Image: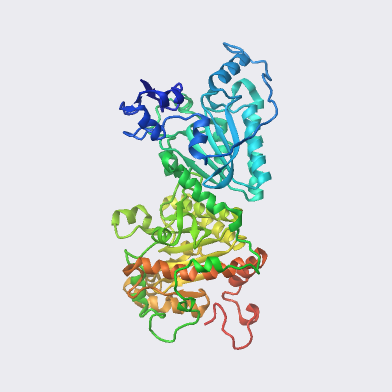
């Protein structure tokens, strides 16, 4: 019997041995697990879910498709550049690690496929001197990045490291810059980089290539950070809180995209690779046939969209403005995650602003819309459960929410895939922490970013479009609005309190603000009205999603046929015209124009 040892700084128990043992004991929950069952569970304890460490070869076997694997190699690294000796000479330690692992150093790299997609994979092995980052590992990670660039295929890096290799001194330190530079070239080339962080990932690895990826996944319970727990405790003179630097801690603090159990990794990687397929680029030949995409859309005719104002108080007009406001705020009205699950195939939510937080009011991720990849970002209010609505700040974003949105938009730009935003918020979060965190700057940065984003951007106001908190996700090539949604510079209550000195005048203010879909269409603020099921989207969310899909796909198809310079020019012209005189806006005498009255 052997132990499953998953502690970050414990000696390696030898996963190859545990896989072959008749029984293994989990050191987390002390359960005994039959060895073959443990192997079938991918070396995850079925009792408590603790993920045992894997060797680099075991990791490759679990993640890669069966079949051909082409090893990547580098030239010889310096064997002992410093002539380093502590209690033992460094060459002796290297020879012992090589004999124990059968590896030349602490990483392997191969070309292979995952879910049928070609990839380059670099995998670290903690058994080899704690997975430390030395010249050989730096050279191999750089070689993997160069191969990814040469073949123009995604790079997956699986990390497991205690930090830099002290025995190689400043040369080890330089590997951080070397690998970061290699990943920067992949950014410039628009090639997806994914990190899978495993237990533990510390020091120079965490502070270089591990955290520079476009998407960072981490296994449950894995630890990642710059300084290890013992170093931090010795420095600050106190014990760390339970769970500090754990996967779950990192997710809550916006540092990783997702905590993914081992048995879900291949599925999620497959979805990410689907989205990153260069054949799905937003840049298309204007003469190319886009019929395949259109054929996958549910059969709702484009004529159902309204591109001209309705003259009456019917469906397009939405009825009395205050009634529309109340309908737009209905607690069961579908919000971003509700639409994401219905609109997109293989939607994978991504988290965090990479600075220190993950705002629950703004959600985003990647998936396929009628077979084509998109990045979807939106406000999520949390549904009818009051506790969940409070946790989601009622859809009011913090600065971290806007920064998360910006990170995902930059990912879309890198991969050349469209952005779809779903707007549903009373406004940006107005509390003290948001102000301390730079709320105004975060909103302004998004406005600037979206004005120059080189991929198609389509925004849909699905519920409340409240002030700058809404606009920060709605600077787009095309702005659509759901039939019973509203969009305004301020809430009716706020307007009534300021101008009428009476919040009870909110219905009057709602009429005066011209915030209904039909009003906004006349003003040119929105381009089309997306019809809803009778009574509102909350009465039939499935049909509401079908109607939205039917609206989005033709618009995205049209935008994909335009080069990005034209898209950006037209997007900027769109906003330049708002509030301008007809002459400035380029309209002829007697023409209506955006912002006209």
Q: Can residue 183 be seen in this view?
A: yes
Q: Report the residue that reaches farthest toward the top.
A: 87
Tell me the quarter of the picture where residue 397 sits. Answer: bottom left
Q: Which residue is drawn at 36% across and 80% down?
A: 319
Instruction: Tell me which colouring the rendered structure shows.
Output: rainbow
Residue 533 pos. (x, y %): 36, 73
Residue 458 pos. (x, y %): 53, 66
Q: Which residue is drawn at 64% across and 32% down?
A: 140
From the image, which quarter does the N terminus lie in?
top left
Residue 286 pos. (x, y %): 65, 68
- Measured along the vertical axis of the image, is residue 362 above or below residue 333? above
Tell me the quarter of the picture where residue 24 sits. Answer: top left
Residue 412 pos. (x, y %): 56, 55
User: In this image, 413 relative to 312: left or right?
Assistant: right
- Measured along the vertical axis of the image, is residue 520 above or below residue 12? below
Q: Report the residue that reaches farthest toward the bottom.
A: 590
Q: Residue at x 31, y 69 (%)?
A: 539
* Residue closest to the eye, 405 or 32: 32
* Residue closest to the eye, 483 or 465: 483
Q: Residue at x 33, y 28 (%)?
A: 33
* Residue closest to the eye, 466 or 207: 207
Total numbered labels: 0
Q: Is residue 261 visible?
A: no
User: In this image, 30 relative to 79: left or right?
Assistant: left
Q: Report the residue that reaches farthest toward the front.
A: 67
Tell me the quarter of the picture where residue 182 sits. Answer: top right
* Residue closest to the eye, 359 or 282: 282
């Amino acid at each position: 019997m052997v132990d499953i040892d998953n502690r970050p700084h414990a000696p390696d128990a030898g996963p190859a041995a545990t896989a072959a043992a008749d029984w293994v004991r989990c050191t987390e929950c002390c359960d005994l697990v039959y060895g073959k069952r443990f192997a079938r569970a991918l070396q995850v304890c079925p009792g408590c879910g603790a993920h045992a460490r894997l060797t680099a070869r075991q990791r490759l076997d679990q993640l890669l498709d069966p079949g051909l694997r082409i090893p990547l190699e580098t030239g010889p690294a310096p064997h002992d550049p410093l002539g380093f000796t502590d209690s033992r000479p460094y060459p002796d330690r290297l020879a012992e690690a090589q004999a124990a692992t059968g590896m030349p150093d602490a990483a392997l790299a191969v070309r292979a496929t995952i879910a049928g997609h070609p990839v380059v994979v670099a995998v670290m092995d903690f058994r080899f001197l704690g997975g430390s980052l030395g010249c050989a590992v730096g050279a191999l990670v750089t070689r993997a990045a160069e191969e990814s660039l040469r073949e123009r295929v995604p790079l997956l890096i699986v990390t497991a490291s205690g930090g830099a290799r002290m025995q190689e001194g400043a040369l080890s330190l330089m590997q951080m810059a070397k690998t970061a530079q290699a990943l920067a070239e992949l950014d410039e080339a628009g090639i997806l980089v994914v990190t899978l962080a495993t237990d533990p990932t510390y020091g120079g690895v965490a502070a270089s290539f591990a955290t520079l990826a476009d998407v960072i996944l981490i296994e449950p319970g894995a630890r990642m950070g710059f300084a290890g727990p013992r170093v931090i405790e010795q420095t600050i003179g106190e014990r760390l809180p339970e769970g500090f630097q754990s996967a779950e801690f990192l997710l809550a603090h916006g540092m990783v995209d997702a905590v993914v159990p081992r048995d879900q990794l291949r599925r999620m990687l497959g979805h990410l690779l689907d989205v990153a397929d260069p054949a799905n680029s937003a840049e298309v030949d204007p003469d190319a046939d886009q019929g395949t995409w259109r054929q996958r859309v549910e059969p709702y005719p484009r004529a159902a969209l309204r591109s001209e104002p309705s003259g009456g108080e019917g469906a397009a007009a939405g009825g009395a403005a205050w009634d529309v406001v109340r309908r737009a705020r209905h607690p069961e009205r579908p919000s971003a995650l509700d639409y994401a699950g219905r609109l997109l195939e293989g939607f994978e939510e991504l988290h965090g602003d990479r600075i220190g937080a993950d705002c629950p009011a703004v959600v985003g991720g990647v998936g396929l819309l009628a077979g084509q990849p998109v990045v979807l970002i939106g406000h999520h209010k949390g549904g009818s459960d009051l506790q969940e609505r409070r946790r989601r700040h009622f859809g009011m974003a913090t600065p971290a929410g806007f920064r998360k949105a910006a990170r995902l938009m930059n990912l879309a730009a890198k991969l050349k895939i469209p952005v779809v935003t779903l707007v549903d918020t009373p406004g940006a979060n107005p509390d003290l922490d948001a102000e301390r965190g730079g709320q105004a700057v975060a909103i302004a940065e998004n406005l600037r970013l979206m004005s120059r984003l080189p991929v198609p951007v389509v925004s849909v106001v699905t519920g409340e479009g409240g002030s700058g908190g809404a606009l920060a996700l709605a600077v787009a090539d095309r702005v659509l609005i759901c039939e019973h949604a509203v969009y305004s510079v301020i809430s009716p209550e706020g307007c009534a309190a300021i101008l009428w000195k009476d919040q009870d005048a909110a219905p009057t203010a709602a009429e005066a603000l011209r915030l209904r879909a039909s009003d906004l269409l006349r003003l040119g603020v929105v381009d089309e009205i997306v019809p809803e099921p009778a009574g509102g989207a909350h009465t039939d969310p499935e049909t509401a999603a079908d109607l939205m899909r039917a609206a989005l796909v033709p618009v995205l198809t049209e935008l994909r046929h335009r080069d990005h310079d034209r898209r950006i020019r037209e997007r900027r012209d769109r906003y330049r015209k708002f509030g301008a005189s007809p002459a400035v806006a380029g309209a002829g005498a007697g023409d209506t124009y955006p912002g006209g009255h």
